[in-house]
Image (cartoon, grey):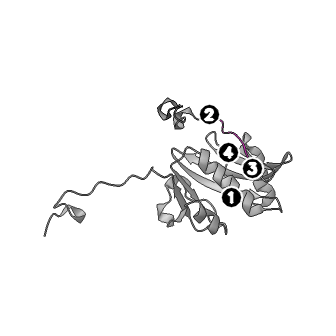
Amino acid sequence: MPRSARRPAPGPAARSSTPEPRTWQGVSYRPCQAGGEEVRGLFAFAGAWAPPPTPLELGWEAVREGRLVGGVLVERQGEQGMLHGPVVVESEEPFGIAEQLIGALLDHAELTTLYTRPQALERLWVRFGFVPLPEAGLPAAFKGRPGSGLFVWRRPGSYRLAPPAPEGEGRGGRGPR
């Protein structure tokens, strides 16, 4: 078949609104089926802080043999989000489960920017392209969350750079010296 006769791959607009679950080593990763309530219960069991429920929140869960073993929650404000978790209560491969949860979330969340607290998972965040950010860079909508330290992730291609200032318009608009 000639190459020109092949159908092009579906673009982002053709994506299904409900992502297919992915499975890795017997654990299924999928969006929360009943909102984030079950994942919120997992956070409470682990003693981790969870944000209050909102209609726009995102949640992903990890399920092994019908039992919830991990989850993440995301507070949304427009195209930005604050990621909480991951919380994993599985003794086998907890870091691998956390990594798969974050990977699934990043693949399917339609957000341009995600913020998170390190929670001793620096190598996980760095592996996915999160970078440290000073607290001053956190949007007002996400300030006041527990934890210290801050990482940020930006969807590739979503960066907006300011155009260079026209010649003669230096810092403060004072013009050339």
Q: Quadrant of residue 163?
A: bottom left
Asked which secondary structure carries label 2, the reply is loop
Please tell me how many numbered marks the rendered image carries. 4
Q: CA distance from mark 1 to mark 2?
A: 23 Å
Tell me the quadrant of the picture where the N terminus can be found: top right
**Which residue in the structure is indicated by mark 2?**
16
Q: Earlier in the sequence, mark 4 or mark 2?
A: 2
Q: Is residue 119 above or below residue 163?
A: below
**Which residue in the structure is indicated by mark 3?**
40
Q: Quadrant of residue 146?
A: bottom right
Q: Nearer the viewer, mark 1 or mark 3?
A: 1
Asked which secondary structure carries label 1, the reply is helix
**Which residue in the structure is indicated by mark 1?**
99
Q: Is residue 35 left or right of residue 123?
A: right
Q: CA distance from mark 1 to mark 3?
A: 19 Å
Q: Earlier in the sequence, mark 4 or mark 1?
A: 4
Q: What amino acid type is highlighted by mark number 1?
A: Glu
Residue 53: assigned label: 4
